[in-house]
């Protein structure tokens, strides 16, 4: 389907971005795989849309089914734009990470509240080409959604850590020991390759966003643990993914209240460009984001 033809007024949905090892969600009823064309190119895969109980759900495998897309190859703008076009209001990002702290053990779950973007070559904004927008990122995670993830994780019997900083590196290689030790000195909690610019784009799209991070290893800094290997990561990942599915099944029915943290109004004062100066092509490309504040001619402004 074309993003430009996405229906307005559709039932709000919870978007789930499945990371490594999470390529599908069991239990989704009336599942349909929908391909979305966006002005920013193709998303990682088709979106699985359906219902889990009373909640409409949209599932996207971040690396594509079969794990075909590297972290640097992911089209983050298309992924988030497609979720927005399909009616997502909340997004849970499930992500494999390495632990950078002794107290975060492999197989633990982490719900970070901050991010550090250490990537080098990713496009991190929908804006540009004649329209300038600056969204606030001081609190990049929706606290209400984080609360639900924390509660669901504890109910699932997982060892969970609330808060901390997720450093996002370019990859696809794992860190050198020197890099890992430097990141440790920076005070970060976990390390991964995918949550930036994903979180930035979710904020620009006015989506409530939170990460359920699955710790698989101690990166390469821990002297008494073997250096990270693909085999070790995959073994722990499979265990963590099973836990994450239990958490999601507990969280999904509870999502639905309006966010009081401002996620849904992030663009209210963010666009600096005079609307009279909007280039028509750029304005059309950003329609899913901007129509609420700058209605096309003949349509009234929506609150």
Image: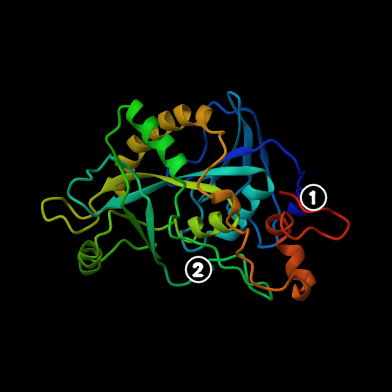
* Residue at 22% over, 43% down: 105
* 279 shown above or below 80: below
Query: Viewer-proximal residue, 156 or 178?
Result: 156
Callout 2: helix, strand or loop? loop
Callout 1: helix, strand or loop? helix
* 82 shown above or below 196: above
Task: State which tag comes first along the sequence, 1 or 2.
Answer: 1
Instruction: Tell which residue pokes out farthest to the left in this image.
Output: 224
- Could you tell me if the residues under marks 1 and 2 are in contact, i.e. CB atoms within 8 Å? no
Instruction: Tell which residue pokes out farthest to the right in this image.
Output: 298
- Residue 46: where, in percent of width, then height? 63, 46
- Residue 208: where, in percent of width, then height? 53, 46
* 258 shown above or below 155: below
Question: Which image quadrant is residue 140 in?
Answer: bottom left
The mark found on residue 5 in the picture is 1
Q: Is residue 271 visible to us here? A: yes
Give left or right: position of 58 versus 120. Answer: right
- Residue 194: where, in percent of width, then height? 44, 56
Question: Which image quadrant is residue 256 in?
Answer: top right
10 Å neighbourhood of mark 2: few (<14), some, or many (≥20)? some
Which residue position holds label 2? 122
* 280 shown above or below 302: below
Give left or right: position of 49 versus 106. Answer: right
* Residue at 51% over, 29% down: 254
Give left or right: position of 290 versus 137. Answer: right
10 Å neighbourhood of mark 1: few (<14), some, or many (≥20)? few
Instruction: Tell which residue pokes out farthest to the top in this image.
Output: 53
Query: Viewer-proximal residue, 253 or 43?
Result: 253
Give the Cα distance between marks 1 and 2: 28 Å
Question: Which image quadrant is residue 183 in?
Answer: bottom left
């Amino acid at each position: 389907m074309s993003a430009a033809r996405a229906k307005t007024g559709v039932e709000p949905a919870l978007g789930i971005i499945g990371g490594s090892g999470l390529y599908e969600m069991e239990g989704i009823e009336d599942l349909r795989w929908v391909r979305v064309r966006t002005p920013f190119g193709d998303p990682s895969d088709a979106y699985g849309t359906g219902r889990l109980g009373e909640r409409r759900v949209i599932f996207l495998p971040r690396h594509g089914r079969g794990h075909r897309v590297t972290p640097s190859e992911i089209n983050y703008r298309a992924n988030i734009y497609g979720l927005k076009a399909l009616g997502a209001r909340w997004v849970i990002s499930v992500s494999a990470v390495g632990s950078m702290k002794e107290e975060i053990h492999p197989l633990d779950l982490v719900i970070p509240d901050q991010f550090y973007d250490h990537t080098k070559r990713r496009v991190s904004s929908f804006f540009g080409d004649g329209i300038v927008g600056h969204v606030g990122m001081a609190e990049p995670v929706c606290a209400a959604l984080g609360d639900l993830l924390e509660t669901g994780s504890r109910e699932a019997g997982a060892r969970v850590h609330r808060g901390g900083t997720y450093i996002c590196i370019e990859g696809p290689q794992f860190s050198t020991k020197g890099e890992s030790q430097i990141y440790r000195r920076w005070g970060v909690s976990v390390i991964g390759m995918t949550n930036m610019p994903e979180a930035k784009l979710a904020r620009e799209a006015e989506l409530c966003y939170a990460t359920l991070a699955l710790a698989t290893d101690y990166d390469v800094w821990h002297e008494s643990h073997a250096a990270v290997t693909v085999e070790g990561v995959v073994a722990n990942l499979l265990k963590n993914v099973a836990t994450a599915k239990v958490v999601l099944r507990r969280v999904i029915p509870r999502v639905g209240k309006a966010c009081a943290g401002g996620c849904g109004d992030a663009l209210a004062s963010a666009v600096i460009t005079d609307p009279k100066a909007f280039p028509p092509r750029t304005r059309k490309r950003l329609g899913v984001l901007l129509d609420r504040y700058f209605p096309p001619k003949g349509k009234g402004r929506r609150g």
